[in-house]
Amino acid sequence: MNMKKIIETIEISKVYGMGDAMVSALNSISLIINTGEFVGIMGPSGSGKSTLMHILGCLSRPTSGTYILDGKDVSDLDKAELAQIRNQKIGFIFQSYNLLPRTSALRKVMLTLTYNRGLRHTEKQSEEKAMDLLSLVGMADRVNHQPHELSGGQQQRVAIARALINDPALIIADEPTGNLDTKSGGEVLELLESLHSNGATIIMVTHDARIAAHTQHIIHLEDGNIKEIQHNGHKPEFTEMAAG
């Protein structure tokens, strides 16, 4: 099967500090993730998983190496250019939801469209799209509720709708169940699995092996290196390149 690459990293490294204070967070990481895959990233504290997530999410740049996202080399883009790529290509789901207080669920999802200058929506079109997505995540009856009126699981569903509003090429979920009880966490995982079944490309960072088991493949990091890539036995094969 000819699969399209969504992510390709070629020997990317990330170094913080200088001289004696220099710390290597990532060491020559090379990997490929194809469109439509559901990939987990795991590793102990200090393994480099957050650094890798930040680079894949265009929140920071590698110190060296090449990062190609959806066919575009984004390795050397400046902050403004990276922000534009994030708005156009990536939907984020965070552990802490990051929802504005005193703002309704509907308005929160709609607001994301205003940051993407490449899209031109009327107010009515934005509202209709936001309503459709809130319905998709099971929040049609909570569109006018503010965060303090929603449970943690409901807030995360709103955050997922917000992540989808710009039709991103890639969804990055950072510990998406970390603040949720078992029942709510399971519901969020089911929702992510449903999105994946419908073609979404998802990268999920987690410290919990039980959560990571819901993905197709798990990238295990240790000391800034890929220790192993675990295949969970469902859906298409993940492509891996030699890692330093």
Image (cartoon, helix red, strand yellow):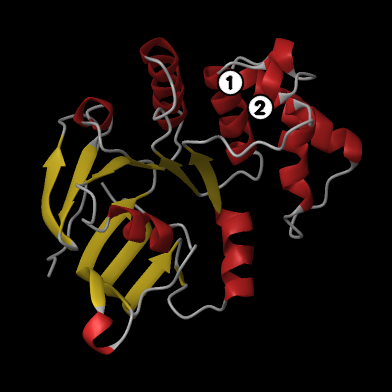
Residue 105: x percent and y percent? 73, 26
Q: Is residue 234 left or right of residue 150?
A: left
Q: Which residue is mark 2?
A: 133
- What's the residue at 43%, 33% (across, down)? 176
Crowd around label 1: few <14 · some 14–19 · many ≥20 (10 Å): many
The amino acid type of the residue labelled 1 equals Val
Residue at image x 60%, y 39%? 98
Q: CA distance from mark 2 to mark 1?
A: 6 Å
Q: Nearer the viewer, residue 11 or 100?
A: 100
- Residue 237 visible (yes or no): no
Query: Looking at this rendering, what residue extends furthest in the bottom direction?
Result: 19
The image position of residue 129, as x and y in percent, is 75, 32
Is residue 22 shown above or below 201?
below
Instruction: Look at the image and tell me whether residue 114 can be seen.
Output: yes
Q: Which residue is mark 1?
A: 137
Q: The C terminus appears in which quarter of the rendering? A: bottom left
Q: Nearer the viewer, residue 124 or 93?
A: 93
In the rendered structure, the answer to whether residue 131 lies left or right of residue 24 reads right
**How many numbered marks, from 0 up?**
2
Residue 52: quarter of image: bottom left
Q: Position of residue 155 (x, y in %)?
A: 60, 24
Circle 2: is it few (<14), some (14-19), or many (20+) Cα within 10 Å?
A: many
Q: Quadrant of residue 112?
A: top right
Contact (Cβ within 8 Å) of mark 2 with mark 1: yes
Residue furthest to the front in view is 20
Q: Residue at x 23, y 73 (%)?
A: 24
